[in-house]
Image: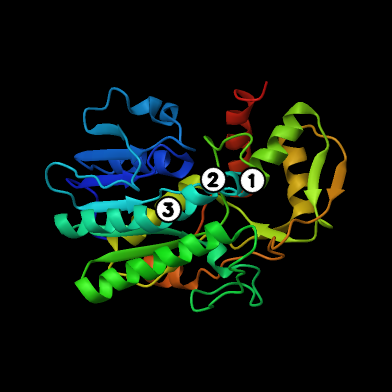
Amino acid sequence: MTATMQGKRVVVLGGAGFLGSHLCERLLADGATFVLSIDNLITGNEANHAGLKKEPRFEFRRHDITERFDVAGPVDYVFNLASPASPIDYAELWLETMRVGSLGTQHGLELAEAKKAVFFQASTSEIYGDPLVHPQREDYLGNVSCTGPRAVYDEAKRYGEALVSAFARKRGLQTRTIRIFNTYGPRMRLNDGRVVPAFVGQALKGQDFTIFGDGKQTRSFCYVADEVDGIVRLALSNVSDPVNIGNPTELTMIQFAEAVRKAAGGGGKLVFLPLPKDDPKQRKPDITRAKTLLGWEPKVGLDEGLKATIEYFRGVVR
């Protein structure tokens, strides 16, 4: 790949979140001359930028992007990673989730249009819902409930993709769209309701592993460094169609709990609870498009990724 972030000026919406903060660091490491992180801190954490406090090329602005905003000077890329992203978050922050996926995305697109920048939309595997096709390819239209408990997130992301596509089609905006599958690593929030911090926290506390359903439902887990590499590769490409970025290695929840137990050296028995409504039974990306068009595939194995993640959470768990 010949294009680079060298000399680029970049805005990252949702930049103080788990994934956004890692992206900010990668962009600066790749030679960006200016990175502005914008986040209202509703689920993000300014502490995620602790390593960038003395970096003169970096700036943080606290702002809710559902309210219009501007950025001084030229901008080459606008990355939209702004949204609550866990079931606990979007159950509590249901209206905020829908507003940031609609109004927030529109305001980001308008900034990119005004600056003649590339707009990068972080979408999600949730747009596939509880899939009837496995693994999930980008041309699969999904099996999604528009009225269920997960709908505020699923439909906000689906609306976001539609809006991005409309700006590209009607206004000629350069756009990129990633569909992110389960991603994990340092800086995840311990109590955000996602399975990685839940299992790791339970293992480190010596608690039982809480598994919803019979534990045979599957997920695939991509380490954050691999995910960010896919984001950057897609941003620098000329691929305008959605691209899945995730790890195609599929694990049942039982298998994943045992992997966490082994890596953490602790944890209790497996406890099974009722499966929440509309919880997907299978989730695995087909990454043929990413391999073919971006030369991307994950490199970090689960053992290595869990080791780094657990080391981070040892400093968080009390």
Q: Are marks 2 and 1 in contact (CB under 8 Å)?
A: no
Of 254 and 121, the residue lying toward us: 121
Disc 2 designates what residue?
93
Q: Amino acid at mark 3?
A: Arg
Q: Is residue 125 visible to us here?
A: no
* Numbered circle sitting on residue 99: 3
Query: Residue at 41% across / 29% down in the picture?
Result: 46
User: Up-down: is 95 above or below 311?
Assistant: below
Q: Earlier in the sequence, mark 2 or mark 3?
A: 2
Q: CA distance from mark 2 to mark 1?
A: 16 Å
Q: How far from the left and from the top, in percent, is residue 117?
A: 20, 57
> In the rendered view, would you say 143 is above or below 254?
below
Q: Residue 194, labelled with which disc?
A: 1
* Coloring applied to the structure: rainbow
Callout 1: 10 Å neighbours few (<14), some, many (20+)? some
Separation (CA) of disc 2 from disc 3:
10 Å
